[in-house]
Image: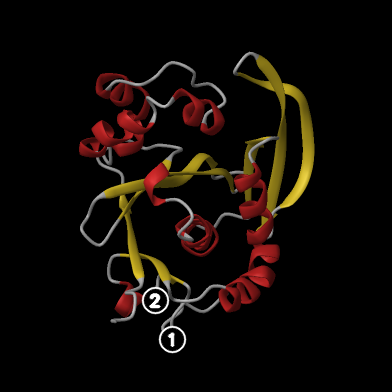
Amino acid sequence: MSERQPAAFQLRPLETDDFAAMAGWFQNVTDLARFDRSGRVPFSTAGMEDTWGQAADPTRKSSRCWFAITTGTEELCGVSGLESITAVNRDAVIALFIDENSRRQGIGIRATALVLDFAFRQIGLNRVTSYYREDNLCSQRMTARAGFETEGRMREAWFAEGRYFDMITVGLLRRDWEARRKALARELDASCTACFRGAVVSGWAWPPGPQDPPAD
C-alpha cells in the first residue's frame, strides 16, 4: 500500500470568483454565527459581493487583506486574513474560516502561522488581535497554540442561537511570535503544508523549510 501523500494547501489573494463558494459556507447559520459576530442572515453571492467586495479589489487602498486557501486542485477550502490594519498603531485583527469538509487536517494552524509571518515580517505589524466566541474551543486551542495571550472577556457581547455568549479577546506581539515560532515549527510535521506561491524559492511556507526567511 502506498504511503499517504502530504496535504498541500496554497494561500493566494481572495478573488471575486471565490464568493459563490463562500456564500455556500455561510448559508450554514451555525457556522456563520460562530465565525462572524455581526453576521446572522445566510449570504447569497450578491450579498457576499456587497460585504466582501473591498477585500478582493486590488485597486482600492484597504485596511483589509484576505487570502483564499486552496487545495492542490485549486479548490477553495478556506479563507484567512487581516482586518482593521492600521499603519499608525501597526496592528490588525486576524480571522480564519475553514470549510467543514477540510477541517481537522491541520490547515488552520498552518494557515494562521503563515498569515502571522506575513503580518509581522512582510507588512511590519507589531501586534495582531483576535476575537472568538467563548464556546468556540477550536479557536481557543488554535490561538493559544500560536502564542496568543488572553487579554479580556467582554461579557454577553455575542448573541447567537437565542442566547448571549461572552467574547474572548486575545493578542500576540511580534516579539512573542518570534519566540513561539521556532517551537511551533518543531511541533508541526510536513503531513500538511500551507504556502504562498513560489514557496520553493522564497521559503514562505508552513512548516518552514530550509529557505525560511530569517527573522530581523
Q: Could one spot residue 7 in this view of the protein?
A: yes
**Residue 124 image position (x, y, % from top left):** 53, 58
Which residue sits furthest bottom?
Answer: 210
Measuring 24% from the left and 50% from the top, which residue is drawn there? 75
Instruction: Name the element at disc 2.
Output: loop
Q: In the image, which disc is placed on residue 189?
A: none
Looking at the rendered image, the quarter that the C terminus falls into is: bottom right
Q: Which residue is denoted by mark 1 in the rendering?
A: 210
* Residue count near mark 2 (Cα–Cα under 10 Å), binned few <14, some 14–19, many ≥20: some
Which residue sits furthest front?
Answer: 1
User: Label 2 sits on what residue type?
Assistant: Gly
Q: Which residue is denoted by mark 2 in the rendering?
A: 203
User: Label 1 sits on what residue type?
Assistant: Pro
Residue 48 shown left or right of residue 166 in the figure? left
Q: Are marks 1 and 2 in contact (CB under 8 Å)?
A: yes
Q: Could one spot residue 66 in this view of the protein?
A: no
**Residue 128 image position (x, y, % from top left):** 61, 49
Looking at the rendered structure, the number of numbered marks drawn on it comes to 2
Displayed quadrant of residue 131: top right
Q: CA distance from mark 1 to mark 2?
A: 7 Å
**Residue 53 image position (x, y, % from top left):** 31, 29
Residue 35 shown left or right of residue 211 in the figure? right
In the foreground, 11 or 59: 11
Looking at the rendered image, the quarter that the N terminus falls into is: bottom left
Measuring 56% from the left and 75% from the top, which residue is drawn there? 185
Sequence-first tag of 1 and 2: 2
In the foreground, 78 or 177: 78
107 above or below 22? below
Residue 18 shown left or right of residue 88 in the figure? left
Measuring 61% from the left and 46% from the top, which residue is drawn there? 139
Instruction: Name the element at disc 1.
Output: loop
Measuring 68% from the left and 35% from the top, which residue is drawn there? 135
